[in-house]
Image (cartoon, helix red, strand yellow):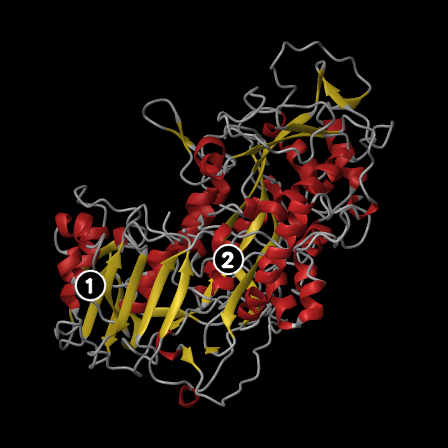
Amino acid sequence: MSHDGVTPRSVMRSVAFLTAGALAVPALAGCGSEDPAGKPLAGQDIAPAARAQVADGGTLRWAVDALPETLNTFQADADAATTRVAQAVLPSMFRLDRTGRPEINPDYLESAEVVETEPRQVVLYKLNQQAVWSDGREIGAPDFAAQWRALSGKDSAYWTARNAGYDRIERIERGANDLEVRVTFGRPYADWRSLFSPLYPKEVMGTPDSFNDGARRKLKITAGPFTVKKVDRKDDEVTLARNPRWWGAPAKLSRIVLTAVSREERAAALAAGTVDLAEIDPAAARRITAAAAGPRGASASPDRDTSASPDHGDDKADGDESRHAAKQPRRERELSTYEVRKSLEPAYTQLALNGSEGPLADERVRRAVARALDREALAAAVLEPLGLPAVPVGSHLALAGQFAYADSSGALGDQDTAEARALLADAGWLPGGPLKETEKGEKAAGARGEKAGGSEEDGKDDTEGRSEGDDDGVYIVGQDDKSGDAGDSGDSGKGGSSGGEGHGPRHLAQDGAQHLKQGGAPGAYAPKGTAAPAGAKSGVLTKDGKPLTLRFVLPSGPGSDSLRTVADRISRMLDRIGIRTETTKVSDESYFKDHIASGQYDLALYSWPASAFPATDARPIYAKPVPAADGSLSVEQNWTRVGTDQVDQLFDQAIGTLDESESRSLIRKADARIWAAAASIPLYQRPQLIAARKNLANAGAFGFETPVYEDMGFLKKGVRVSPSPSK
């Protein structure tokens, strides 16, 4: 999970809900109908080139957010850089294709299939006979067995972040020969393809000490196209070198250097020419595009403020401007050697509603919030300026193109301002009621009663959105006379004034579901006959003398500008149904730990990665919170704190069936119920913007597909390739 400005597959409610059978799940598509999974909204953009067109040798300098704290992907502090290293140096039995679906990795496997289902599920792996570790030893059953024992959860001495799937294995043994591995499951496991990717050598997994500490700073034994040559924490670099024992197509590059460059420093690093490949924000993308257009494009760069006063100030300012201008040609020349490669990231941004207490504990209020949102306008505001398809995400558990995707948003209903107001009225929130006096610092009706975040930095030096005279970093929509622009009305078309989505450090399924016809799902609407309250368009709603005010917590970092723009649009949409929002901006460092994970918010925006294995990876995100032994609430990764026994049961059934069609159908049913609970509202797929050297091939915006590290490299002199399409 990530917020858009501060994600990993590792770690990727006690309120009234719909009663059993009350939700009418959208009908599944019949036989012969079009696959509801569809196709990915955007394809890869990696400047594909045949290996013969790529030069041998060279070093790729690839920017990462930070040096990995561990090289063991199964530890809690593993991050995106950990995954990148593992993909380049370790075996994976399966890899993801362009649609986000798992496929056999032929460099390691000849085949893998379920060969028995009764009395136990048995999967037989037939290994590539050339596959060896960098020390010359064959990859085989001892490595599979060591990883199973380490991740099974039976030995607490192993400090593992997850054991999903491995805890279902009963035994692992050699098959008919050394190249066969038989894995017998004690309980059926639908997502068996998620296991052993990556696969670590038995030397790492064999003992708790080697697992906990041996692979944090180094990997002596590997089995990929590259090896880990050096982890330099002084210079913040990880150097990967060509593996001389690699049996597959030889790596084109001699080295890949992962270098830590913060998001704020990416543009400067590109202008200085110190990196070849870097994920960037929309502002940096505009600079690169302008530089590529030449002097006229650079002068029209949207990053340069041309609306300032014609009074240029004193001579010192003129001198500073002249010196700055002198540096510009060199910077722009360097930037012109890059291009922006773009796609949609395999992750989506959602609006999270904390249903643990306050007004949002009432599902009618949550549904009112959801039905006030114009998700098409929000997606357009972020994606259209970047030239990417602006289509709202229709599932919590998969993205368009993935095997389990189908749009189940009809279980909640489309945007409808009148219906949203009626839901609020049914929940007792009415316009024009008397307001009780609140004591200083007391919150109106949102969660916890805290006014702003806990740290000194919360709201500090942040004047955006404050009302006049406000000095605490808090802005309440609905307390001024401003009417938002028409683009946020909820009845309008697309919005498009914002830049693209901000990006931060990095670290899910459906079936032939169609939108419900008019009338929708029982329980997803206000009772028939409920009158929408009369009154002003933005009239304040009250209940028991308190106004309906929700605390909207957002990160304040420089990479979250567009996220805050989306939040502002959402606030205006909610204002139109009488819900005030109190926006509090907090430091990136405290956003998740002190606010999202601890439940100190009413509304928040953050992202989840899409998984090819939603029955396994999404369950902890939507699991019903349960009381812990110490009296606290155990929420796993369900930060909205809303869940149902029905959803849990559907996940359990989906993970326990070996019928892929049935598992997919169960996942889609679970998604429809998650939609109806209205605690998590998917908005849009995140944009993926990558700055790449123009002569760098087979690298860039990868989309769903696992990168092929051995094919990356720089084009031979004189070779030109056509840019890959982004759609």
Mark toward the viewer: 2 or 1: 2
In this view, the residue in front, 433 or 235, is 235
Along the horizontal axis of the image, is 80 left or right of 431?
left
Query: Which x, y percent locates residue 30?
Result: 62, 67
What residue does disc 1 label?
Answer: 144
The CA distance from mark 2 to mark 1 is 45 Å
Seen as rendered, the residue at the extreme front is 315
Q: Is residue 237 above or below residue 373?
A: below
Report the residue at 22% width, 64% height from top: 183
Please report the residue visible at 48 percent of the width from the left and 43 percent of the height from the top: 622
Mark 1: which secondary structure? helix
Q: Residue at x 61, y 74 (%)?
A: 32
Left or right of 242? Residue 7 is right
Q: Circle 2 sits on which residue? A: 268
Which kind of residue does numbered mark 1 sit on?
Answer: Phe
Q: Position of residue 251 (x, y in %)?
A: 32, 79
Q: Is residue 165 above or below residue 360?
A: below
Q: Badge 1, how many Cα within 10 Å: few under 14, some, many 20+? A: many
Work out whether 545 lies above or below 341: above
In the image: residue 252, left or right of residue 405: left
Q: Quadrant of residue 206?
A: bottom left
Q: Residue furthest right?
A: 535
Q: Foreground: 89 or 651?
A: 89
Task: Kindly tell me whether residue 412 is visible in this rendering.
Answer: no
Q: Which mark is residue 409?
A: none
Q: How many marks?
A: 2
Residue 280 in view in this figure: yes
Neighbours of disc 2 within 10 Å: few (<14), some (14-19), many (20+) = some
